[in-house]
Image (cartoon, helix red, strand yellow):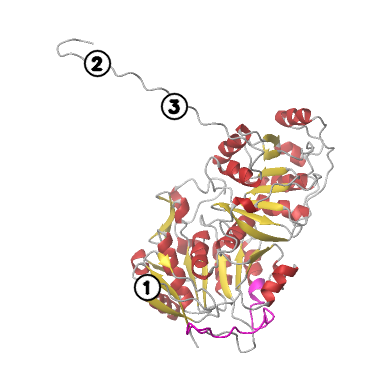
């Protein structure tokens, strides 16, 4: 039994719509897909903002798990459980391994631990295979021999190649015929040419994208993916179409190599995803959010993608924007938010590692304006493996948040922040947020900041609602609290303002654009022979 899917129209992917979709008109190529159209997707990422990005881009009913042990368990909310148990809907589970800052061995082991549950008993059986419909399209490989659907695996990696890319890729490849890699993210000006990531036309290792990493960026994808044995496929091979590319992927796998695909456009990424999917569960996908979006265009049903702002209800609780990123654009983003009426609270690095430290001047002014004193500080030591009572982060004194207000909280980096100090400061920032009463809705920039804040709050599961803009993913906790995550390097100057306005449409007043100056009256042209 086979199902026709992934029909490719120029620049458009015909979705794997299930169970009774007809191929789109005008298709030039039809691939046979060896997937049950309700096979679950299991995706993993090395940081929280990347995991949330994938959960939204897949366009499927999804849940985001911060505890990898829960990734293979049924959902625990009644609606989600009913949807999952029906067996007729493809669902996705995306897991944040929180391994971006781990050592390579620990990061690889985290991937292996999740893969270890991917055998025939990884997911309990769901419902029954759906019947054939009147379209003549039948499900292929509806279940495995043991009655379980095959898993569709996706590994999210940072498009700038930060983190333990090679160690995790090698672990992800264990047990697979091949891992197909595509790291381009065209929407942000990041493309791959001849196996090299380019950022706005500049090779990654020559750009400033790694300025906060304290080390040099890899010169190529094969270097970043080592020790995984790879072969680069040029964009010309991609643009020959999904069927031809699938043949190249199989040839690489037959030689024990894992294909790394050049890509410059979203259409390129769609072809790569189509080709890999046509080869079945033995081929796993590894890539940026761009490849995840391509996968969503093929298998998604529109869920949790570009949700209209009408669904985002303003609440009585405060809105707190927590900025832990050191990206240069952040200052401009905060300035736009403050100009629209948000309160800005900055904490000095000293206040996050010393419970007796003073607030920065504008934090004192904010507390006075709100008519209350800062909350008393109390020291709480970080419980991670790098705990050190002498340098552990503390709760900084912070004014209470007004219920109908937008507050942005950031670290004062005027004196510079050393990379070795950054994680302690983010942990202190997270504990400060967790100590606030009232359970504010949250906007969290930077994957490390987002994860540490949610850990401090004890939040382990999120359900995506949609994207406010590229990379800014709106989720809800089981209790209905809004959490928006966004990579630190994403978004234009008005990013934070757009997010806050989507969550609280009536609280902020963006400054009006200045009126254009009246045109100057035309001047008479100089007369010939007369000096002006």
Q: Which residue ends up furthest to the left in the rendered image?
A: 529
- The boundaries of the magenta stretch are 113-138
Q: Mark 3 Cα within 10 Å, few/some/many (few <14, many 20+)?
A: few
What residue is at 56 percent from the left and 69 percent from the top? 154
- The location of residue 183, given as percent across then percent down, is 48, 61
Q: Is residue 167 above or below residue 482?
A: below
What residue is at 50 percent from the left and 61 percent from the top? 224
- Magenta-span inclusion, residue 122: yes
- The location of residue 116, given as percent across then percent down, is 66, 76
Q: Are marks 3 and 2 in contact (CB under 8 Å)?
A: no
The answer for how far apart the CA atoms under marks 3 and 2 are is 24 Å
- The location of residue 525, given as percent across then percent down, is 22, 17
The answer for how far apart the CA atoms under marks 2 and 1 are is 62 Å
Q: Is residue 464 above or below residue 502?
A: below
Earlier sequence position, callout 3 versus callout 2: 3
Q: Is residue 74 left or right of residue 233?
A: right
Question: Depth check: 205 or 278 in front?
Answer: 278
Numbered tag placed on residue 516 in the rendering: 3
- The location of residue 456, given as percent across then percent down, is 76, 52
Q: Are marks 3 and 1 in contact (CB under 8 Å)?
A: no
Which residue is the site of mark 1?
27
Which residue is the site of mark 2?
524
């Amino acid at each position: 039994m086979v199902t026709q899917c992934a029909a490719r129209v120029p620049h458009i992917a015909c979705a794997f719509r299930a169970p009774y979709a007809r191929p789109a008109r005008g298709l030039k190529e039809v691939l046979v897909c060896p997937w049950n159209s309700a096979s679950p997707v299991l995706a993993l990422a090395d940081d929280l903002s990347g995991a949330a990005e994938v959960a939204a881009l897949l366009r499927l009913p999804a849940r985001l798990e911060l505890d990898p042990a829960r990734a293979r368990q049924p959902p625990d909310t009644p609606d989600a459980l009913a949807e999952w148990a029906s067996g007729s809907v493809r669902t996705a589970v995306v897991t944040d391994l929180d391994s971006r800052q781990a050592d390579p061995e620990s990061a690889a082991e985290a991937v292996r631990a999740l893969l270890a549950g991917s055998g025939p008993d990884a997911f309990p059986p769901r419902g029954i295979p759906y019947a054939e419909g009147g379209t003549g399209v039948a499900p292929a490989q509806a279940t495995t021999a043991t009655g379980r659907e095959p898993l569709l695996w996706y590994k999210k990696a940072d498009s700038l190649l930060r983190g333990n890319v090679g160690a995790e890729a090698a672990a992800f490849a264990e047990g697979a015929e091949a891992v197909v890699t595509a790291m381009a993210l065209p929407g942000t000006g990041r493309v791959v040419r001849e196996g090299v990531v380019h950022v706005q036309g500049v090779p990654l290792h020559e750009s400033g994208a790694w300025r906060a990493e304290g080390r040099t960026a890899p010169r190529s994808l094969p270097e970043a993916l080592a020790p995984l044995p790879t072969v680069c496929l040029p964009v010309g091979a991609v643009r020959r179409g999904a069927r031809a590319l699938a043949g190249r992927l199989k040839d690489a796998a037959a030689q024990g190599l894992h294909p790394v695909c050049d890509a410059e456009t979203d259409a390129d990424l769609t072809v790569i995803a189509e080709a890999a999917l046509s080869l079945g569960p033995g081929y796993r996908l590894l890539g940026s959010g761009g490849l995840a979006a391509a996968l969503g265009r093929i298998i998604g049903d529109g869920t949790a993608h570009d949700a209209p702002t009408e669904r985002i209800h303003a609440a009585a609780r405060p809105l707190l924007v927590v900025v832990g990123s050191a990206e240069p654009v952040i200052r401009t983003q905060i300035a736009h938010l403050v100009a629209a009426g948000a309160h800005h609270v900055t904490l000095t690095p000293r206040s996050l590692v010393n419970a007796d430290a003073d607030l920065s001047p504008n934090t004192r002014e904010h507390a006075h304006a709100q008519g209350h004193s800062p909350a008393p500080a109390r020291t709480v030591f970080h419980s991670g493996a790098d705990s050190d009572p002498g340098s552990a982060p503390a709760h900084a004194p912070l004014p209470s948040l007004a219920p109908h207000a937008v507050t942005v909280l950031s670290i004062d980096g005027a004196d510079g922040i050393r990379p070795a100090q950054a994680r302690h400061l983010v942990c202190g920032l997270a504990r400060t947020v967790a100590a606030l009463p009232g359970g504010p809705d949250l906007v969290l920039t930077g994957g490390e900041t987002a994860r540490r804040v949610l850990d401090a709050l004890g939040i382990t599961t999120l359900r995506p609602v949609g994207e406010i803009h590229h990379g800014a993913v709106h989720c809800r906790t089981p209790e209905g609290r809004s959490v928006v995550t966004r990579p630190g390097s994403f978004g234009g100057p008005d990013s934070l303002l757009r997010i806050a306005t989507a969550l609280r449409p009536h609280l902020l007043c963006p400054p009006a654009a200045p009126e254009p100056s009246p045109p100057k009256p035309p001047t008479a042209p100089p007369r010939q022979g007369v000096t002006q």
